């Protein structure tokens, strides 16, 4: 089931992400979305390293700045977006299935691999043919194609000589990632 029906739904989710990564007190979200309000981004409960919104799910690479910050962030964005989506589409009940899954990153290699995995998702899932033009991912921000400040991308990009090197790092694994995706779906068929 798609959790975003329109470009406005994706944009609304992005606003929710930005809003809830900052610790309160702050103006209600309904005020935030109606007029520009500057939030104190020095009070983030999480740093969003990278993200990707897919038609029926989302991925985040987060750094926790406060005890329980990741759980709080995911809970708030999930609840807020579900309320918005249900009201807008005159539906009831949960939108997202199950509890969120998280993995503690234990090495720099894992950190880099996860950023690549997240950024490749729309290409591997055949949602887009060009990652550079996919609006619902932090990939364009990483390449300097947008001036958004949602992500704390330096932890990744400081490990590459240039954004071109990062792009090569990501795109060099497209074929391998597609093969893994096929294997993953074949394994699910046998269960």
Image (cartoon, rainbow, N blue to C red):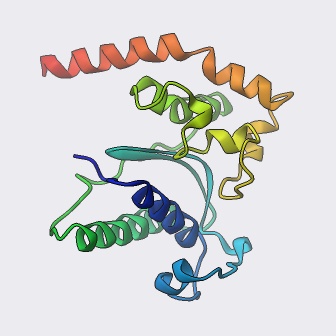
Using the rendered view, name the quadrant where residue 111 is placed.
top right
Which residue occupies 77% across, 45% down? 154
- Determine the residue located farthest toward the right in the rendered image: 161
Is residue 132 shown above or below 42?
above
Is residue 81 shown above or below 146?
below
Image check: 26 left or right of 142? Answer: left
Image check: 52 left or right of 182? Answer: right
Residue 68 seen from this side:
no
Residue 176 seen from this side:
yes
Which residue occupies 46% across, 65% down? 12
**Percent x, y of residue 126:** 40, 25
Image check: 76 left or right of 1? Answer: right
Which residue occupies 38% across, 66% down? 75
Which residue occupies 67% across, 53% down? 151
Is residue 165 shown above or below 105?
above
Using the rendered view, name the quadrant where residue 130 is placed.
top right
**Percent x, y of residue 112:** 64, 31
Numbered label tally:
0
**Percent x, y of residue 16:** 49, 68
Is residue 14 shown above or below 126?
below
Q: Nearer the viewer, residue 148 or 111?
A: 148
**Percent x, y of residue 94:** 20, 63
Q: Nearer the viewer, residue 186 or 106?
A: 186
Quadrant of the image containing the C terminus: top left
């Amino acid at each position: 089931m798609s959790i975003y029906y329109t470009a406005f739904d994706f944009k609304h989710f992005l606003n929710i992400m930005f809003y809830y990564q900052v610790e309160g007190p702050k103006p209600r979200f309904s005020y935030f979305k109606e007029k520009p309000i500057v939030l104190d981004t020095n009070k983030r409960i999480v740093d969003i390293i990278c993200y990707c919104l897919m038609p029926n799910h989302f991925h985040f690479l987060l750094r926790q700045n406060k005890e329980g910050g990741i759980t709080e962030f995911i809970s708030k964005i999930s609840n807020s977006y579900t309320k918005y989506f249900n009201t807008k589409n005159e539906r009831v009940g949960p939108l997202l299935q199950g509890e969120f899954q998280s993995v503690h990153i234990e090495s720099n290699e894992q950190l880099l691999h996860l950023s690549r995995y997240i950024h490749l998702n729309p290409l591997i899932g055949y949602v887009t043919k060009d990652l550079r033009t996919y609006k619902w991912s932090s990939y364009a921000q990483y390449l300097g194609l947008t001036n958004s400040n949602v992500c704390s991308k330096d932890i990744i990009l400081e490990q590459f000589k240039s954004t071109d090197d990062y792009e090569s790092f990501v795109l060099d694994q497209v074929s391998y990632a597609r093969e893994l995706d096929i294997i993953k779906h074949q394994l699910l068929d046998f269960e």
